[in-house]
Every structure is written in structure tokens, then in C-alpha cells.
Image (cartoon, rainbow, N blue to C red):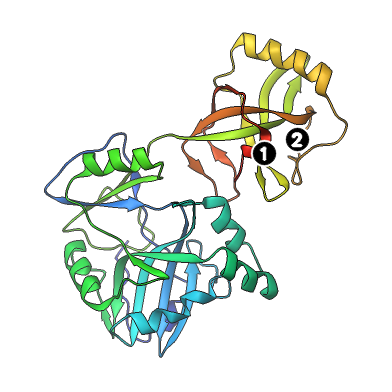
């Protein structure tokens, strides 16, 4: 398939383009042929800037302009009339991106709620690529050249952050792991940008992450515990975020069977219970440590594994 070439006017491509995606790699590496960036735990957004107006599009082509009104300042932070930026919208909490918080904003449709979220959950647009500038398609230019142009024309000022480039992948990965961030992306300096492509020129490397969860139920079949039904608190609501069976020992399963006999309840404790059969609901009094790779767009844990039970209070399991 021939690469797409952007021609004026830029607006014709709004909601049509699919961003370039990285492939997964197993471990970090160093390479003089790559630059390395932090992989932010947020919502992928293409920003179309035309005649002082900003329109925002997500990974699947959905319009997200209303959800992030604070990004209407973008024209004031760029040197150019017509631009296409690629980046990640994040919502910070306690110094780190919170995927549940940004999803709360991304799913919001009510204007009064959006205004309240702008005040209490402000977003940051982490820009990591420039694809089009004043009538010129830059996608065929090398990644390194696009980065140099981006640094010249974009002012990194709240609510916009220009993603840093690092020369060492291993050191950056260790720092990301230490801070509990999502991961890193290795990008070939000479690579072009290919819409909708998932090639080897961009590689993502992500450590497993750790989360305190509440056990709100069990997947129960023929008298056997199959998995824990997990949740976390957003404000006062307990949200269901997935099930985990991996890591449960035979002793754990027997223990949970005994726990269920004493703490069973008729109705689910979750505000969004799973639509599954064979669920046994529990009073949300037990916490467990879970490791996982990432969040899904539907706010579920991907590849969760039970690390061990905890003596932490359920109220500490915050999303």
C-alpha cells in the first residue's frame, strides 16, 4: 500500500487518518540509530490546527474537540497557520499520568461536566511528532528532521508538553520503571511516518505495572474459584476493572472459598458489574496486589496476575 501524501486543505483529513503505531519489543536496548521517548499513559490524539481553530481526533477517528477545550490555546503556542500534530493527552495525578482520569474525561459528553473536569482534572497534551506544516507534508521526512522542526515551532508551555528525546534506551527504561510510568518507545531516526502502520521502525517496551485492587467477587464454577473479580475506587464508586486467575495458588483458591462463605452478598458491589454468569459477589473488604501490562480503552487490566493479598484498606485502592 502506497503511503498517504497530505495535500491542502488539511481539514479534508479530519477523522479520516489513523496514527502510526509501535510494535512491542521484549526488552530495552541502546542504539545510535534510534531516539527514545517516554510512552505516556493517555489517549492518542491528532491535533488539526487551521486558521486559529483546533480540532482533535482520537486513534479511531472519533472527534474529541469538546472533551479537551483547554487545548484551544494551541494556535498561540505554534509558529504556523496550518499544522497536524501527533501526541498523547494525559491527566496527571500525584505526579504521574492517570489513565482512569483521562478516560473519565475522554468519555464525558455533558458540557457542564466537561467544564468542571477542566478545573479539577486538567489535561496535558504531550506532543511527539509533527506531520504537516503550512501546506507541506512532513510524513516522508526522517523522524529526526521532524523533531528538529517541531522544536523550532512549538512552545512547550502548559497545557502542552513537547516530548523529550533521549539517546539511551536502557537508562530511560530504568527511570521509567522506577517512576511507575507506562514504558518507552524507540524510534528510528531515519524513519518516515506511515498512517495506520504498525511497523518495526517504532518499538514500545513496557514493564509490568502494579496496582492495589479490591476483591468484589469471584468467578465461581462447580464449587471452584476460577478468578478474582477486581475493582478500584473512583471517588466513592467501586469500578469493576477485570478478573485475574493467573497467580492464584491452590491454597489461595481454598482460602477464597472459605472467605466467600462468610462474606457473600446478593448484589454486586461494583457500579458497573460484569455481565457474566457464575459470579459470586463479596463484601468489598479484601485487597490484593495485581501486576498487569496496561489499561485497555474500556478501563480493564490487560494480562493481570495476582501477586499476593494485602492488609491495606479497600479505600486505598484508588483509580
- Along the viewing direction, whichever of 36 and 146 lies nearer the viewer: 36
Examine the rendered structure and indicate whether residue 36 appears above or below residue 209: below
- Label 1 element class: helix
Circle 2 packing at 10 Å, graded few (<14), some (14-19), many (20+), is few
Relative to residue 178, is residue 227 drawn left or right? right
Relative to residue 193, is residue 215 drawn left or right? right
**Residue found farthest to the left:** 32
Circle 1 packing at 10 Å, graded few (<14), some (14-19), many (20+), is some
- Label 2 element class: loop
- Distance Cα–Cα, label 2 vs label 1: 26 Å
Q: Position of residue 228 (x, y in %)?
A: 67, 26
The residue sitting at 38% across, 86% down in the picture is 9
Q: In terms of image quadrants, where is residue 44?
A: bottom left
Q: What is the number of callouts on the image?
A: 2
Q: Earlier in the sequence, mark 2 or mark 1?
A: 2
Examine the rendered structure and indicate whether residue 139 appears above or below residue 287: below
Q: In terms of image quadrants, where is residue 318?
A: top right
Q: Position of residue 270 (x, y in %)?
A: 75, 41
The residue sitting at 35% across, 56% down in the picture is 197
The residue sitting at 56% across, 63% down in the picture is 121
Q: Is residue 43 visible?
A: yes
**Residue found farthest to the bottom:** 51
Q: Position of residue 210 (x, y in %)?
A: 49, 34
Q: State the quadrant of the N terminus.
A: bottom left
Q: Position of residue 281 (x, y in %)?
A: 80, 30
Relative to residue 44, is residue 103 drawn left or right? right
The residue sitting at 61% across, 67% down in the picture is 117
> What number is the disc on residue 295?
none
> What number is the disc on residue 315?
1
Q: Which residue is mark 2?
A: 276
Amino acid at each position: 500500500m502506497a503511503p498517504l501524501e497530505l495535500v491542502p486543505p488539511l481539514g479534508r483529513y479530519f477523522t479520516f487518518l489513523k496514527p502510526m503505531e509501535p510494535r512491542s519489543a521484549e526488552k530495552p536496548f541502546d542504539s545510535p540509530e534510534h531516539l527514545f521517548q517516554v510512552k505516556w499513559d493517555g489517549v492518542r490524539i491528532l491535533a488539526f490546527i487551521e486558521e486559529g481553530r483546533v480540532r482533535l481526533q482520537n486513534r479511531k477517528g472519533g472527534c474529541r474537540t469538546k472533551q479537551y477545550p483547554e487545548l484551544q490555546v494551541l494556535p498561540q503556542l505554534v509558529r504556523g497557520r496550518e499544522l497536524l500534530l501527533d501526541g498523547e493527552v494525559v491527566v496527571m495525578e500525584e505526579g504521574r499520568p492517570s489513565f482512569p482520569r483521562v478516560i473519565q474525561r475522554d468519555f464525558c459528553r455533558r458540557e457542564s461536566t466537561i467544564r468542571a473536569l477542566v478545573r479539577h482534572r486538567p489535561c496535558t497534551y504531550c506532543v511527539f511528532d509533527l506531520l504537516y506544516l503550512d501546506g507541506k507534508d512532513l510524513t516522508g521526512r526522517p523522524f529526526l528532521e521532524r523533531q528538529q522542526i517541531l522544536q523550532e515551532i512549538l512552545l512547550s508551555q502548559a497545557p502542552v508538553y513537547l516530548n523529550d528525546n533521549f539517546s539511551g534506551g536502557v537508562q530511560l527504561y530504568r527511570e521509567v520503571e522506577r517512576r511507575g510510568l507506562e514504558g518507552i518507545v524507540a524510534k528510528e531516526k531515519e524513519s518516515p511516518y506511515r498512517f495506520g502502520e504498525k511497523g518495526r521502525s517504532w518499538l514500545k517496551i513496557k514493564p509490568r505495572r502494579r496496582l492495589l485492587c479490591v476483591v468484589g467477587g469471584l468467578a465461581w464454577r462447580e464449587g471452584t474459584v476460577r478468578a478474582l473479580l477486581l475493582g478500584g475506587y473512583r471517588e466513592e464508586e467501586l469500578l469493576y476493572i477485570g478478573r485475574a486467575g493467573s497467580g492464584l495458588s491452590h491454597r489461595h483458591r481454598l482460602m477464597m472459598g472459605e472467605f466467600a462463605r462468610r462474606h457473600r452478598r446478593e448484589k454486586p458491589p461494583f457500579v458497573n458489574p460484569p455481565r457474566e454468569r457464575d459470579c459470586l459477589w463479596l463484601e468489598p473488604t479484601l485487597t490484593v496486589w495485581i501486576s498487569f501490562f496496561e489499561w485497555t480503552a474500556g478501563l480493564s487490566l490487560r494480562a493481570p496476575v495476582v501477586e499476593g493479598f494485602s492488609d491495606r484498606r479497600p479505600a486505598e485502592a484508588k483509580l
